[in-house]
Image (cartoon, rainbow, N blue to C red):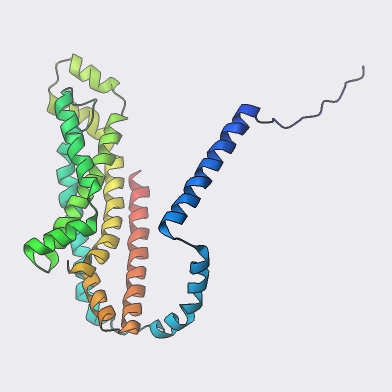
Amino acid sequence: MNLSSKTNTPNMLPAKVKMRMTAIFIAVLGFYLFSSYKTDASFLELISGLGNMPLLLEEFFPPNLSLFSKIWPSLAETIQMAIIATTIAAMLCVPLSLLAANNIVTNKYLYNTVRFLLNLLRTIPDMVLAIVFVSLFGLGVLPGILALIVFSLGILAKLISETIESIDTNPLDAMRASGANSVQMISFSVVPQVLPQFSSFVLYVFEINIRASVVLGLVGAGGIGQVLNNQLSIRAYPNAMGIIIIIFILVIIIEFISNKIREAII
């Protein structure tokens, strides 16, 4: 018996799908060209500006790495700012996350109010928060910590609330049907399911706060960023480059440790 050989032909996209993808591509390209025109953004200017890079590198290199011992107190201050802000934001986000989860809160008015407040917190940039708190409390670490707390709270509460909304509700419904109160349901049904993700998100926000605290220091909110801003203002570019490299190494080390902790938790 002769078996006829069958050739496998690749699946072709339907004509409607092709037209839809083409239309989306043209629309995105149109928005890009329109935005580039309105903002006067040009790749030619970018290419022409790259010619100044050798002159800039000559001013920043070789970096001065010998000032590590002098900037270590400010560097430690930056780490402490991130630790304090992340810890306080993690504690504050717990009740807010529960109130912003629609499978925990049945009162729609309360749910929508908390959601609105969290959305409002996330719309305020951390730099604006730092400027506001610096104007209220003056230069130093306190404005930076307060700005990082508000900034972290908006991120953490959103991530945790969405995690709570995606949990398995069967244990929650069973405990509710058996007469358990709210504290018992949260403690024995919600917390065990959310705790690994909660720990991972807190570590992630801590990494963000390390970087953000450096930027906030540029507006006088303390930490290594303030030292970096001082070196840039007096045009001590080798010192500034040395600080940037030290910050880069610090961020890499913290990221590595944080990833190892997350792997162990999850």
| Depth check, front residue: 32 or 153 | 32
Q: Is residue 223 left or right of residue 135?
A: right
Q: Is residue 99 left or right of residue 199?
A: left
Q: Position of residue 203 (x, y in %)?
A: 29, 51
Q: Residue at x 17, y 38 (%)?
A: 96
Depth check: give the residue in front, 264 or 174.
174
Return the x and y of residue 182 as percentages of the image width and height. 13, 25
In which image quadrant can residue 66 be found? bottom left
Position of residue 4 measured from the top left corner of the image (x, y, whole percent): 87, 22
Quadrant position of residue 17 = top right
**Extreme residue in the top direction:** 177
Quadrant placement of the N terminus: top right
Q: Nearer the viewer, residue 139 or 90?
A: 139
Q: Residue furthest right?
A: 1
Q: Position of residue 225 (x, y in %)?
A: 24, 70
Seen at 19% across and 36% down, the residue is 116
Q: Is residue 182 above or below residue 58?
A: above
Name the residue rendered at 18%, 56% in the picture. 129
**Vertical arrangement, residue 235 with respect to residue 137, above or below:** below
Residue 206 vs 237, above or below: the answer is: above
Please tell me which residue is depicted at 30% across the width and 84% down the height of the picture. Answer: 236
Q: Is residue 84 visible?
A: no
Query: Quarter holding the C terminus?
Result: top left
The residue sitting at the front extreme is 38
Q: From this viewpoint, is residue 161 visible?
A: yes
Q: Is residue 197 left or right of residue 53?
A: left
